[in-house]
Image: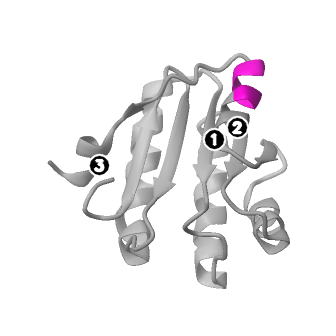
Amino acid sequence: MNKLGYDIARSRDALLLRYSENWDHQVYLERFGESLVAFTDTFGDRPWAIIDDISNWPVKPPDEMKMCSELAQILVEKNLKHFAVFGSEYAVSKWMMEQIIPDQIEIGFFSSLEASKDWLKGKGYSVEFISLNEVFSGS
């Protein structure tokens, strides 16, 4: 985990997003989304996927939901096709993610990272992730 409290890992065609317990929401608003969008260019025109560990971010206030929804729409334009979510059993978390993620993306909810990986692997994605922590922390 970097000092800003989030970690991005990638495979050939997927990203894994994780957040620490004390991650900086303001930094997310200012930098994480922009960095995420810039990085997706490496996937080119190929379909790609995200695994999002929301265990340390199960509930989002309205302003963050709006920002996440806008970011998700940009990612759709960059060919995001599948979105696996794990880390929260709260019904409100599932509802929020369903509001944020556009209909063009197939979303799955899982109880673990392994179940999320299995789902994406079954759809043909690589799930061997390498951390990009240094890239996004500015090191």
Q: Please name whichever residue, 125 or 46, is drawn nearer the observer in this view of the structure.
A: 125
| Residue 79 shows in this picture | yes
Q: Answer yes or no: do the residues labelled 1 and 2 have beta carbons within 8 Å?
A: yes
Instruction: Indicate whether 30 appears above or below 53.
Output: below
| Residue 104 magenta-highlighted | no
Q: Which residue is mark 3?
A: 136
| Residue 121 magenta-highlighted | yes
Say few, some or many: other residues with alpha carbon within 10 Å of mark 3 (under 14 / 14 to 19 / 20 or more): some
Q: Residue at x 39, y 77 (%)?
A: 26
Say few, some or many: other residues with alpha carbon within 10 Å of mark 1 (under 14 / 14 to 19 / 20 or more): some
Q: Earlier in the sequence, mark 3 or mark 1?
A: 1
Q: Which residue is mark 2?
A: 116
Instruction: Point out the frontmost of discs 2 and 3.
Output: 2
> What span is in magenta?
118-122
Relative to 91, 30 lies left or right: left
Q: Residue at x 60, y 50 (%)?
A: 52
Relative to 39, 61 lies left or right: right
Tell me residue 9's x, y (percent). Answer: 43, 38
Q: Please name whichever residue, 96 or 78, is drawn nearer the observer in this view of the structure.
A: 96
Instruction: Indicate whether 96 appears above or below 121.
Output: below
Q: Residue at x 14, y 48 (%)?
A: 139
Q: Which secondary structure class fits the magenta region best?
A: helix
- The span from disc 1 to disc 2 (Cα, nearest Å) is 5 Å
Q: What's the amino acid at mark 1? A: Leu
- The span from disc 3 to disc 1 (Cα, nearest Å) is 22 Å
- The span from disc 2 to disc 3 (Cα, nearest Å) is 23 Å
Q: Which residue is mark 1?
A: 113
Residue 18, labelled with which disc?
none
| Residue 81 shows in this picture | no
